[in-house]
Amino acid sequence: MKAAIITAAGKTPVYRDFAEPVAQSGEELITVRASALSQFSKSRSSGSHYSSDGVFPAAAGAEGVGRTVDGRRVYFVSPQAPYGAFG
């Protein structure tokens, strides 16, 4: 998949290929339809927010809306690292 990838804390994201996520037990894949470029997303991506896990490279973005495999519309926040809402 193509995604906005952050290679290190504080670096500008680059648009390139990134590994497709695989749903683990109890998880569900979401096809992102829209994502927010909020202060929350920016600070998590820069590594300065307390909830940032500091795993790099990572897809940027902390929240958005999308559809599940069965078509339900959902809101999501804090995707499992290293995946993000801009992927």
Image (tube, helix red, strand yellow):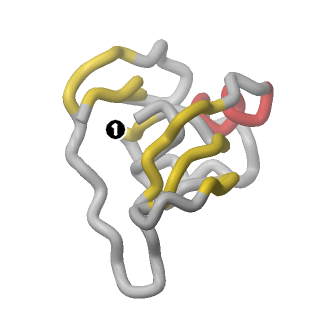
Above or below, comparing residue 21 to residue 5 in the picture:
below
Question: Residue 46 location in percent, x, y?
Answer: 60, 29
Of the residues shown, which amino acid type is indicated by label 1? Pro
Residue that extends furthest to the bottom in the rendered view of this protein = 25
Above or below, comparing residue 54 to residue 33 in the picture:
below
* Residue displayed at 34% across by 70% down: 23
Q: Secondary structure at mark 1?
A: loop
Above or below, comparing residue 60 to residue 37 in the picture:
below
Q: Quadrant of the C terminus?
A: top left
Residue that extends furthest to the front in the rendered view of this protein = 71
Question: Residue 38 location in percent, x, y?
Answer: 76, 26
Q: Nearer the viewer, residue 52 or 77?
A: 77
**Residue that badge 1 annotates:** 57
Question: Residue 60 location in percent, x, y?
Answer: 50, 32
* Residue displayed at 77% across by 35% down: 40
Q: Is residue 50 left or right of residue 23?
A: right
Quarter where residue 22 is shown? bottom left
Q: Nearer the viewer, residue 43 or 35?
A: 35
* Residue displayed at 47% across by 18% down: 11
* Residue displayed at 35% across by 15% down: 14
